[in-house]
């Protein structure tokens, strides 16, 4: 795993490692230059866990590659700071590899603390029923693979600061490695707690997509929806009321999946609080789309300026 200024959350992660039903043979943590108590907190677990901390300034890809290179095992499990792991996380990932898989794709679920975070998780994070295992691209907050997978794919792309795990996933798929989905290997992580933090997160994700030249059609559809279809229906609605109905129906359909998740995940909230969270769903959806629309061209511009100097040429 990699860490950077994770003092508030690192104990939760390491405590969840202590509770694993299968303990790791070694734990290699790459620190990107923490200026808080992260490293000290990690080393406090040295008498209970086989931890090695390595200084690895640079992108998260650099940290991942440094940590994996330093590991001695042939089976590598990867996670991130800021999560806590289900007790069976490592056992289930390793079992899939020992059964013959090259890659074990774990899952991730929200670990919300507030009503806003419940709404955030429901809007942006899939549930197991949303996943098509044959198309699932695992997050590197919950994945395991054979060392040879990492070696043949050239490791994580160090020229990327975000979306590095997607590029790594696509690389091992192109190389023909066999992936198995392991939905029980769950990493729980806390959704962003404010719109500002969420905007920055999705701006960075989309900028990474632009740098890596990913999801052109998906991004084009978003620009067409917000830049052409929605404005056209708004204008047409002045003369043709039916156009307003199309706009509203389209937006409600767009919210259908987040709404389904939210109603299930918020069942224990008081009615007034549940309604307050419900009102956040369209706001979060639109803010996320706008952040992606702002971030993607920034990434494309970076790619044009750096053509010929990164791994994708």
Image (cartoon, rainbow, N blue to C red):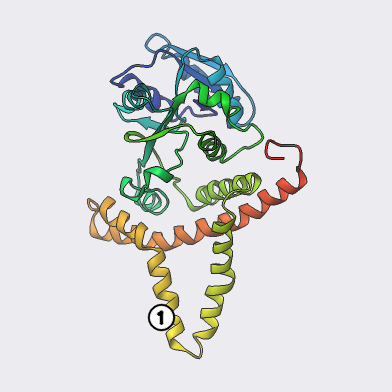
Camera-side residue of 66 and 268: 66
Q: Is residue 35 visible?
A: no
Q: Position of residue 289 (x, y in %)?
A: 52, 58
Q: Position of residue 97 (x, y in %)?
A: 38, 24
Q: Which quadrant would residue 9 be assigned to in this image?
A: top left
- Disc 1 secondary structure class: helix
Please report the residue visible at 24 percent of the width from the left and 59 percent of the height from the top.
271
Q: Position of residue 218 (x, y in %)?
A: 54, 57
Q: Which quadrant would residue 109 be assigned to in this image?
A: top left
Image height of 153 relative to 227, above or below: above
Please report the residue visible at 38 percent of the width from the left and 48 percent of the height from the top.
126
Q: Is residue 20 visible?
A: yes
Camera-side residue of 9 and 100: 100
Please report the residue visible at 38 percent of the width from the left and 16 percent of the height from the top.
24
Instruction: Name the side, left or right, on which 159 lies relative to 47.
Output: right
Instruction: Name the side, left or right, on which 188 lies relative to 301.
Output: left
Residue under circle 1? 245
């Amino acid at each position: 795993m990699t860490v950077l200024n994770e003092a508030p959350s690192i104990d939760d992660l390491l405590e969840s490692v202590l509770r694993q039903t299968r303990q790791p043979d070694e734990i290699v943590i790459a620190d990107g230059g923490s200026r808080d108590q992260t490293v000290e907190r990690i080393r406090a677990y040295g008498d209970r866990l086989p931890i090695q901390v390595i200084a690895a300034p640079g992108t998260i890809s650099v940290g991942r590659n440094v940590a994996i290179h330093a590991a001695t095992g042939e089976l590598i499990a990867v996670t991130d700071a800021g999560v806590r792991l289900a007790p069976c996380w490592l056992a289930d990932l390793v079992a899939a590899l020992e059964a013959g898989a090259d890659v074990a794709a774990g899952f991730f679920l929200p670990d919300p603390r507030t009503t806003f975070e419940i709404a955030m998780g429901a809007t942006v994070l899939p549930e197991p029923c949303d996943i098509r295992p044959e198309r699932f691209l695992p997050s590197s907050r919950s994945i395991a693979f054979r060392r040879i997978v990492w070696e043949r794919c050239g490791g994580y792309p160090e020229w990327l600061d975000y979306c590095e795990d997607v590029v790594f996933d696509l690389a091992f798929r192109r190389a023909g490695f066999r992936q198995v989905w392991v939905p029980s290997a769950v990493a729980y992580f806390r959704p962003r707690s404010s719109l500002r933090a969420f905007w920055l997160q999705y701006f960075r994700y989309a900028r990474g997509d632009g740098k890596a030249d990913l999801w052109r059609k998906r991004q084009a559809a978003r620009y067409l929806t917000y830049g052409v279809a929605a404005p056209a229906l708004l204008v047409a609605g002045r003369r043709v009321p039916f156009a307003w109905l199309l706009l509203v129906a389209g937006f409600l359909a767009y919210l259908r999946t987040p709404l389904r998740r939210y109603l299930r995940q918020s069942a224990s909230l008081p009615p007034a609080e549940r309604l307050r969270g419900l009102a956040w769903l369209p706001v979060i959806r639109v803010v996320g789309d706008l952040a992606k629309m702002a971030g993607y061209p920034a990434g494309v511009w970076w790619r044009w300026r750096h053509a010929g100097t990164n791994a994708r040429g």
